Image: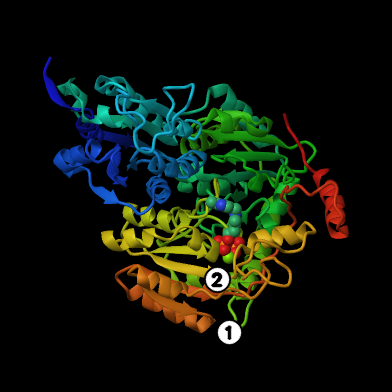
Amino acid sequence: MATVRMTMAQALVRFLAQQYVSRDGVARRFINGVFGIFGHGNVTGLGQALEEIGGDLPYYRAQNEQAMVHTASAYAKLTNRLQALACTSSVGPGATNMITGAAAATVNRLPVLLLPGDTFASRLPHPVLQQLEHPMHQDVSVNDALRPVSRFWDRITRPEQLLSSLPGAMRVLVDQAETGAVTIAMPEDVQTEAYDYPAHFFEQRVHLIPRSLPVEEALGEAVARIRSAARPLIVAGGGAIYSEASEALGAFAAQWGIPVAETQAGKGALPWNHPWNVGPVGSTGGLAANRLAAQADCVIALGTRLADFTTASHTAFQHPGVRVVGINVGSMDAHKMGGLPLIGDARATLVALGERLRADGHRGRPGYGEEVARLKGLWDEEVNRQRAVGSPAVLTQANMIGIVNELSGPRDVVVCAAGGMPGDLLKLWRPLDPKGYHVEYGYSCMGYEIAGGLGVKMADPSREVYVLVGDGSYLMLHTEIVTSILEGYKLIIVVVDNGGFQCIRSLQTSCGSSAFGNELRYRSQATGRLDGEFVVLDFAKNAESLGAKAYRATTEAGLREALQRAKRESRTTVIHTVVDREARVPGYESWWDVPVAEVAGREAVRSAQETYRTARKRQRFYY
Ligand SMILES: Cc1ncc(C[n+]2csc(CCOP(=O)(O)OP(=O)(O)O)c2C)c(N)n1
Ligand SMILES: [Mg+2]
């Protein structure tokens, strides 16, 4: 057997460069680069390997390990999980900085490969710099903290272990149901150790991404349920987009007269103006989808995790006989809410259901189509109204969203993750392209926005990327602006300055407490709380100092002007907008479960508790 002698790190690099995926007959390389921050735990091992044989696999230097994992997640999301990036860190703090990013990737079912350095397998110099010494467990390092947030986890203590570990890691990365963060911890000495690897280990490998179908009986039962339903509703989640099901979904909805509601991850699966797209459903949903959901007797959950925002914390579906049909590549998701599990690819399953419905001679549902069209009309008008709220002199967040949407192109991408904006975007943004709406709301991780925007731009530089980021999120993590400039990936970043964590302040006051600890104010001498004057920050200057082009906009006209200029720029541009702190887009006949104190001195909290207890009575469980 021909062998090649190389270090464990060199073998890893060579193997990764040869992994391809193929779906629908199109093959592409899976791992397309490595993000990293070097330290003693990876620079002489993996760093050496990348320098010597990594030509094929570009290396990107990040500013923050959490951020680079977000960048990798966003990259994978934009490519419908058909391409990914690896992220390497040193031992210790670099590795633990990746935990948040790993959790975000795993929650969102996005493939990222994490390659943290680890303490010496030999243990000879221990404790090494940055080692966590556990008094009892000698085989524990901080990398073990990555286990619960990873879908595959391994530690390579001998170079030949790569032979079994890497194929296992690849299986999980490309598996549409199991994918998420995959961690291969690399003790720093092992990275540099040589082994005679079989030459065929480095041959090109193409992993097929199947379009699997549910078992025939499940399809048959689903057809019967859809056929007998008077008020069916499809809830389209991220899986619909990942499987590129837009066309099949649009045709299915129109042919069988079934409205399609959207989740955060599923928004864009149908263009906003598709006649059967009734808009967002759930806690931050719109009135058309929420009214249809409340009365639906058959909910077809298509590629969705059925998270609490989608189900309005289990209050969205109120029909006494409602039943769920769960179409999902993942068994866990397909079974949710007592659903009839159709375990399969979203697109292939819709096509299969359509064929069987046709054979079955499906009859129409009198009046339902008209009702759907009427509700959609009402919702479209409401979105117009909300986007226009504000005055020429004072911007509101709704206003800002409307303007950015209006001035962006049909293939451009809006990126967001946390704060009040995701809910408003879900209601008000009007995507035309399935990849045009990119909101990370599985982990809703502050700090994802700019780092994620970078990943989107790297995955498709032909699209303009609009990152909408709250002042709170910006302050938490904005330093990948520097990476975007180093690498020449242009972002248009709109910072929405409303004086701090306003969505959490709203939540706090709506549950009866008085506002404290959320806004960006000086500590007041009089009260001892952070309720003094608002701190005035200059986000434009901050961005400029990092190399970005920057503008400030406080009016509608100013924002339009700044966006036009930003579009003409070739490098990352930051627009600091100041919006009305109090203006809110309302909720639409929905609810979100946030617990309220059962004992409180304040009357307002007691009253909120009462309201909460009543609202909870609408929660339904279907198991
Ligand atoms: C990493 C992280 N920490 C805390 C939270 C909880 N959280 C959600 S939104 C939010 C405030 C965000 O503030 P900002 O970005 O200014 O948005 P706004 O609420 O003003 O819309 C906080 C603290 C979170 N989602 N992520
Ligand atoms: Mg804010």
Residue 208 visible to the viewer: no
Q: Locate residue 513, reporting x and y percent.
A: 78, 59
User: Which residue is drawn at the image coordinates 23% and 47% (left, top)?
Assistant: 58
Residue under label 2, please give it.
497
Give the CA separation, mark 1 to mark 2: 17 Å
Q: Quadrant of residue 323?
A: top right
- Where residue 180 appears, as percent x and y from the top left, is 45, 36
Q: Position of residue 71 (x, y in %)?
A: 39, 50
Q: Quick check: is the Cβ at mark 2 less than 8 Å away from ligand 2?
A: yes
Ligand 2, image quadrant it occupies: bottom right
Q: How many numbered marks, from 0 up?
A: 2
Q: Which residue is mark 1?
A: 392
Residue 546 drawn above or below residue 182: below
Residue 498 occupies which quadrant of the picture?
bottom right
Check the image and report above or below for 439 versus 501.
above
- Judging from the image, the colouring scheme is rainbow
Q: Nearer the viewer, residue 236 or 520?
A: 520
Q: Is residue 589 left or right of residue 79?
A: right
| Cβ at disc 1 under 8 Å from ligand 2 | no
Residue under the point 48% across and 74% down: 576
Looking at the rendered structure, which numbered label has been put on residue 135? none
Q: Residues within 10 Å of mark 1 (few under 14, many from 20)?
A: few
**x then y, percent, for residue 378:** 68, 64
Give whichever of 304, 62 is nearer the camera. Answer: 62
Task: Classify mark 1: helix, strand or loop.
Answer: loop
User: Looking at the picture, does residue 579 appear above or below residue 585?
Assistant: below
Check whether the beta carbons of the residues at disc 1 and disc 2 lie within 8 A of each other.
no
